[in-house]
Amino acid sequence: MGWLEGEVALITGGGSGLGLALVERFLDEGAHVGVLQRSQSKVDALNKRFGDKIVTVAGDVANFADNVRAVNATVERFGKLDCFIGNAGIWDHYADIVHMSGEQLDKAFDEIMGINTKSLILGAKAALDALIDSNGSIIFTLSNSALYSAGGGPIYTASKHAGVGVMKELAYELAPKVRVNAVAPSGMNVNIKGAASLGQENLGLLDARDPEKIARGMPLNFLPEPEDMTGSYVLLASRQNNRPLTGVLINAECGLGIRGLRQPRAGFFDE
Ligand SMILES: NC(=O)c1ccc[n+]([C@@H]2O[C@H](COP(=O)([O-])OP(=O)(O)OC[C@H]3O[C@@H](n4cnc5c(N)ncnc54)[C@H](O)[C@@H]3O)[C@@H](O)[C@H]2O)c1
């Protein structure tokens, strides 16, 4: 028996990276899964791989009508919705105000905030009635950039910090009916893409950065696979394991917050 037996989850951006790892894990835990995913080729690949175990909708998380279609398709197929996971996102490849033009910053702000932040509010709104019916929960994928500088440029960092505000406000507004929590992963072994408005739509994080260097920057000294992150989501979604948590951000950031001066302690940093 899995922790999510009979539960129904809708996962945005479930076609690759962390979203795909969540689809796999939630199915393994006994859940039924819906996916809202922008790329048609990823939707086709999901359908080919999982067949009628999941329901997929091609659409844009920054568009309210597409979120509504995804919620309706999931509820129609599986009869209810227990958990909405706002996970789709894009990066900014450290787009900074020194090198970007004002016009680029203007366009990139709208695109990245739309996909990373507005989507959380629109998705929650689309799922709200179904989640109230089920006494369900919402989980947002944020980032170490929800907590600290240096995980992106100011726009990506703003988009993820803003996600903390959305999570807390919704946790307050939707209690006691719907629990609202978030997970802040560190960098992962995932080739997340950049912003189209900056010409980065086909440029992945791992195309531009050395994975070993990213790993060395982590106090825990490894670059996590997306699968390493999924346990936090299972905990937050699980009714048996999580009655009390709402408004909680799980810092799944490999110890970045306790880095300190990175001086040797017990000799471990030398290994
Ligand atoms: N990769 C990392 O190192 C890292 C670190 C911290 C946080 N995150 C966060 O993890 C989440 C998942 O990203 P990932 O790393 O798995 O990358 P990914 O690119 O593999 O997954 C993101 C998915 O979202 C989809 N998507 C993008 N824009 C969309 C839109 N407008 N509508 C619908 N779907 C859309 C993409 O097609 C893709 O399948 C993001 O919110 C990201 O910010 C990633």
Image (tube, grey):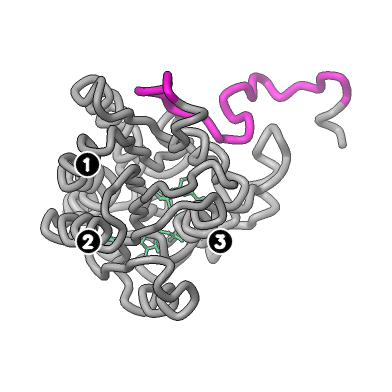
- Region in magenta: 243-267
**Apparent side of residue 3 relative to residue 148 in the rendered image (left or right):** right
Type of amino acid under label 1: Ala
**Residue highlighted by disc 3:** 206
Which residue shows up at 42% across the image and 44% down it?
152
- For residue 77, above or below residue 166: below
**Apparent side of residue 115 relative to residue 90 in the rendered image (left or right):** left
- For residue 219, above or below residue 91: above
Magenta: main secondary structure equals loop
Image coordinates of residue 259 in percent, x first then y, are: 64, 24
Q: Residue furthest left?
A: 65
Which residue shows up at 81% across the image and 22% down it?
264
| Quarter of the displayed picture in which ligand 1 can be seen | bottom left
Tell which tag, 2 or 1, sits nearer the viewer. Answer: 2
The first of marks 3 and 2 along the sequence is 2
**Residue highlighted by disc 2:** 76
Tell which tag, 3 or 2, sits nearer the viewer. Answer: 2
Label 1 environment density (alpha carbons within 10 Å; few <14, some 14–19, many ≥20):
many
Which residue shows up at 59% across the image and 47% down it?
1
Numbered mark located on residue 124 in the image:
1
In the rendered image, residue 13 lying in the magenta stretch gets the answer: no
